Amino acid sequence: MAVQIVDQTNATFPRLVVAGLSGDSGKTLVSLALLLLAREAHIEVAAFKKGPDYIDAAWLTWASGLPARNLDTFLMGFPKAVGSFARHALPGGLNIVEGNRGLYDGSDARGTHSTAELAKALKSPVLLVINATKVTRTLAASVLGCQKLDPEVQIAGVILNQVSGVRHERVLREAIESVSGVPVLGVLPRAPGDALLPERHLGLVTPQEHPRIESVHSNLLSLAEGMLTWQHCSASPPGSRRYRLKRKLTIGRRTAGDSRSVT
């Protein structure tokens, strides 16, 4: 599907689209953790939410300290959505765009208005968050399928969510990286979602209604620190389609360090 890219994307805005294989993959959790970790490292952040969702946008506003902007290509069209990103993104900071549903889920069978199409319009790398509950090598097939379905979508890395232990993480990492070549950049342990972000019939409870909002910040950092640490994330001008990601990941007593550049 061809999507027109407006001229505003020629500016340099370090950016990352956080996507998933489906709803409830952990996109909001990872997005919030990345924003909080970046702020802890004194990196300026801005947040965006694909689609009209106001609850996730409220949480992104809470984590970033700035109003989170909705990027809804269905209501706004692609040029206006990308233009809104260009107006509100931070040239010297980290700009996180949280997707919705699965990476390729859109308004029709072709994936029109999907997170993948928005990522291409923004010329942004994609971080794929995967719920790893009760699955191992099958996720390698899922990641490979996401790569092959549209090679123009830049899947920069994978975050594994709901990992049960060191062996589970080792098998998942080896399978995904050997089959797809996509690096596993983070591992989050199994934890009940309601312990951090309670849900109700409309989705998450809003930050204003959270009964223990003062503890969410520390709990998210405690969950993510050592498991998910972005030391640097930057994007060069979109024409080069080049970005650098550095990672330092820990699970249990195992530590892995890596720095990779993808073109």
Image (cartoon, helix red, strand yellow):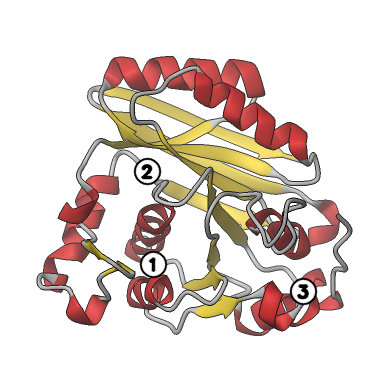
Q: What residue is rendered at 77% in x and 74% in y?
A: 78
Query: Alpha-carbon distance for marks 1 and 2?
Result: 16 Å
Going by the numbered disc 2, the residue's amino acid type is Leu
**On the picture, is 186 further left or further right than 217?**
right
Foreground of the two, 81 or 138: 138
Q: What residue is rendered at 32% in x and 63% in y?
A: 40
**On the picture, is 175 further left or further right than 125?**
left
Residue behind mark 2? 228
**Residue 228 on image: x %, y %:** 37, 43
**On the picture, is 49 further left or further right than 30?**
right
Q: Which mark is residue 86?
A: none
Residue behind mark 1? 42
Can residue 182 be spotted in the picture?
no
Tell me if label 1 and label 2 are in contact, CB under 8 Å: no
Can residue 74 be spotted in the picture?
yes
Q: Which mark is residue 78?
A: 3
